[in-house]
Each structure stands twice: as structure tokens, then as C-alpha cells.
Image (cartoon, rainbow, N blue to C red):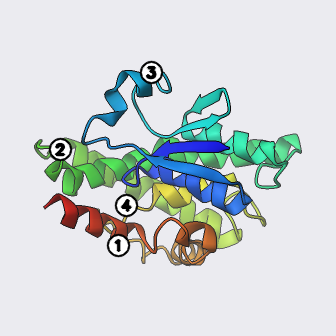
Amino acid sequence: MITIYGNEFSSPSNKVRYVANALGIDYEYKPVDLMGGANKTESYLKLHPAGKVPVLQDGDFVLFESNAILRYLAQKVSSSLYPQEIKRRAVVDQWMDFASLHVGPALGKVFFNRVAYQFLNTEVDPRSLADGLQFLQRFLPVLEGQLAKSAYLAGPELTLADFALLASLDQAEAAGVELSVYPALSQWRKELIAKDFYQKCFPSYVAMLQSLMQKAS
């Protein structure tokens, strides 16, 4: 049995669950209470020495870093979500990295300074917020251009790249980032959110976040 350790607040954790659901992989999900420090316990640090989420455990095999986990899951069941052909695979990797290294961190800066700071007993960093918004203004048009000419991010078929981007954008509404100005991106996202692999996690990230905020208040 595969075990996935994660937190619903974490987009990297959620994208692992999206992919596992889409692949029909049976797994046990174990929420990690980050606010309560469960990620800093001796037992958890044996799974992830940096105390982060997500972590995948498959028998005696332990793996962290969300994109590595996505590739592992897809290859475990020989899924077309991660193509075998070297050039197709490279394009998938390219867009996975774009989503995870550029879009996700940029939106994360905005989300942290508009939402998350309240839970972490810290202050807003105006420079970080401005940087996040500036990066999104640079990167979101790139995604719009790609999805205006292609059904999915890495081509005509759904791949791991789409899951990476989908999770990276989950915090958009809560962070006050308007995506409707990007019609191709918005339509692509709307269609994927409606699919079973997403709905098995929660109806929407915003609804899940509101529920967590109510519990915390």
C-alpha cells in the first residue's frame, strides 16, 4: 500500500493526490499537521529530513519532492501522463518545471502576503507581494499563449505538466489573483477542476480553505 503524507494547504501535496487519483492508484492519505509541528517530529524527519510535504512511502521506499513523486507514480503504472518518447517527455518536464519553479512560487508569494501570514503570526512583506504580482504578470500570459494553441499544457494530451500547473494555481482566488482575463487558461482549469481526480480531494481549494479558516478561528 502506498502512503501519501501531505497537507491540504500545500499545493505540492495536492498535486500528488490529483495524479494518484487520476491514475487509479490505491493509497492511504495521512494529513500532516504543519501548524502543530507534526512535520518536525523525529519520526517524520526520517521520512523527509527538511520536514516538508509531500512524502510518498511505497513499502520500504520513501520519496520526497512532488515532481519526483509524480514521475514515480506515472512510471509505476506505465501511464501516458509521462510519455516514453524522449522529446515528448522533455516537453512535459519543461512545463512541469515552469509551473513548479516559476508560477507556483510567484503565486505563493501573493498568497502568503494576502492570506497565509494571518495563520503564521507574521507580517506582510510588501516587497515579496509586489515581486509575486510582477512575476505573475510575466508568466501567466505565457501560459495563456500556450493553452490558446494547445488543448493541454504540453500538447494535445493530458500529462503530468497539467497537474503541476493546476495545483500551482489552486490558491489564485484566495490570493485575489484574477485569472478570468486569461480565457484559454481559465477554460482549461475549469475543465480539469470538474474531473473526478480533483473532486475526490475537495470541491474547490477555496471551499477547503474556508473550512480550515473556520476551524482555526
Q: Quadrant of residue 151?
A: bottom right
Residue 6: horizontal and vertical position, in percent? 46, 45
Residues under labels 1 and 2: Cα distance? 20 Å
Q: Amino acid at mark 1?
A: Ala
Q: Which residue is pictured at 79% across the width and 43% down the height? A: 75
- Relative side of 49 to 151, left or right: left
Of circles 4 and 1, the one toward us is: 1
Q: Which residue is mark 4?
A: 171
Q: Which residue is mark 2?
A: 120
Q: Secondary structure at mark 1?
A: helix
Q: Quadrant of residue 66?
A: top right
Residues under labels 3 and 4: Cα distance? 26 Å
Would you say the residues marked 3 and 1 are in contact, meaning their CB atoms lie under 8 Å apart?
A: no
What number is the disc on residue 207? 1
User: Which badge, 3 or 4, is on the more N-terminal residue?
Assistant: 3
Quadrant of the image for the N terminus? top right
Within 10 Å of the Cα at label 4, are there few (<14), some (14-19), or many (20+) other Cα atoms? many
Would you say the residues marked 4 and 1 are in contact, meaning their CB atoms lie under 8 Å apart?
A: no
Residue 28: horizontal and vertical position, in percent? 57, 50
Q: Which residue is mark 3?
A: 49
Q: Secondary structure at mark 4?
A: loop
Q: Amino acid at mark 4?
A: Gln
User: Which badge, 4 or 1, is on the more N-terminal residue?
Assistant: 4
- Count every numbered label the image shows and give the total: 4
- Residue nearer the viewer, 6 or 88: 6
Q: Secondary structure at mark 2?
A: loop
